[in-house]
């Protein structure tokens, strides 16, 4: 994903438009992959049902539970995938496999072969649903944050306050105005807030009226 850096020159309107177009293409691609994944898993579950390897209740139970787990994991993922999320996903997937197999084979007394295939399919739903869902969520959020700040009074006040406190942000806004982009985006405002929180130089400053 594109990262705004307020210590560098702001992107032009053409560059933002190009980046937004790339995000729209990526969104369509991810949604296509998500649709294909759903169709494949649906075929697997239907095959298990019509072949008599699993009952209707068993298929419905394992499908719904795996989808719910995938949605919960995707909703908690950070906008940028972090390495420490992978062990959590692996642990949850293994637990889902074991729970699905145990529930089907021993709880509902379904055939072992059908239970094993369904358990593997449920783990696949969790992995693909989580990863694709988190990426789709990130792309949608980024597209929204690329909208310019026009009528949002609160965001405008935040920009004014940050510009008043930090010369780097004033310079960034001035450079953006010089390239005919007076309205910054929500993503740039978010980058400014992040810079203020993480920059040692910024954190060492005293706010007006604050005594040392």
Image (cartoon, helix red, strand yellow):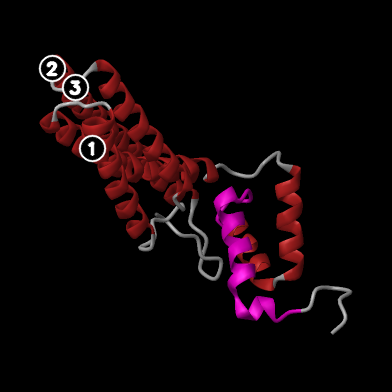
- Picture quadrant of residue 123: top left
Q: How crowded is mark 1: few (under 14 residues within 10 Å), some or many (20 or more)?
A: many
Query: At numbered mark 3, what does the secondary structure look like: helix, strand or loop?
Result: loop
Q: How crowded is mark 3: few (under 14 residues within 10 Å), some or many (20 or more)?
A: many
Looking at the image, residue 138 lies above or below residue 27: below
Q: Which residue is drawn at 13% across and 32% down?
A: 112
How far from the left and from the top, in percent, is residue 88? Answer: 37, 56
Calculate the distance from the C-alpha at mark 1 to the C-alpha at mark 2.
Answer: 17 Å
Q: Nearer the viewer, residue 53 or 21?
A: 53
Lower sequence index among marks 1 and 3: 3
Q: Which residue is drawn at 20% across and 24% down?
A: 45
Is residue 191 rendered magenta in the image?
yes
How far from the left and from the top, in percent, is residue 180? Answer: 58, 51
Q: Is residue 13 visible?
A: yes
| Direction from residue 212 to residue 133 in the image, left or right | left
| Direction from residue 25 to residue 139 in the image, left or right | right
Please name the predominant secondary structure of the magenta segment in the image. helix
| Direction from residue 145 to residue 171 in the image, left or right | right
* Residue at numbered disc 3: 54
* Residue at numbered disc 1: 101
Q: Which of 76 and 80 is in front in this view?
A: 76
Residue ranking furthest to the bottom: 212
Query: At numbered mark 1, what does the secondary structure look like: helix, strand or loop?
Result: helix
The residues colored magenta run 179-205
Looking at the image, residue 52 lies above or below residue 5: above
Q: Which of 74 and 63 is in front in this view?
A: 63
Which numbered circle lies on residue 7?
A: none
Q: Quadrant of the N terminus?
A: bottom left
- Picture quadrant of residue 71: top left
Q: In which quarter of the image is the C terminus?
A: bottom right
Looking at the image, residue 20 lies above or below residue 88: above
* Residue at numbered disc 2: 52
């Amino acid at each position: 994903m594109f990262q705004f850096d307020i210590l560098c020159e702001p992107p032009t309107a053409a560059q933002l438009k190009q980046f937004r177009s790339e995000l729209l293409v990526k969104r369509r691609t991810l949604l296509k992959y998500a649709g294909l994944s759903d169709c494949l898993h649906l075929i697997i579950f239907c095959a298990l049902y019509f072949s008599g390897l699993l009952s209707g209740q068993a298929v419905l139970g394992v499908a719904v539970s795996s989808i719910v787990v995938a949605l919960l994991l995707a909703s908690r993922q950070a906008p940028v995938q972090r390495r420490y999320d992978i062990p959590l996903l692996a642990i949850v997937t293994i637990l889902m496999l074991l729970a699905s197999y145990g529930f089907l084979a021993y709880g509902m007394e379904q055939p072992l072969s059908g239970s094993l295939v369904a358990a593997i399919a449920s783990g696949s739903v969790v992995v693909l649903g989580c990863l694709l869902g988190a990426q789709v969520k990130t792309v949608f959020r980024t597209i929204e944050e690329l909208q310019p700040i026009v009528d949002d009074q609160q965001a405008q006040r935040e920009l004014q306050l940050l510009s008043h406190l930090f010369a780097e942000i004033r310079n960034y806004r001035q450079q953006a105005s010089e390239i005919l982009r007076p309205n910054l985006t929500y993503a740039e405002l978010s980058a400014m807030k992040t810079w203020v929180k993480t920059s040692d130089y910024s954190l060492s400053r005293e706010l007006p009226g604050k005594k040392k």
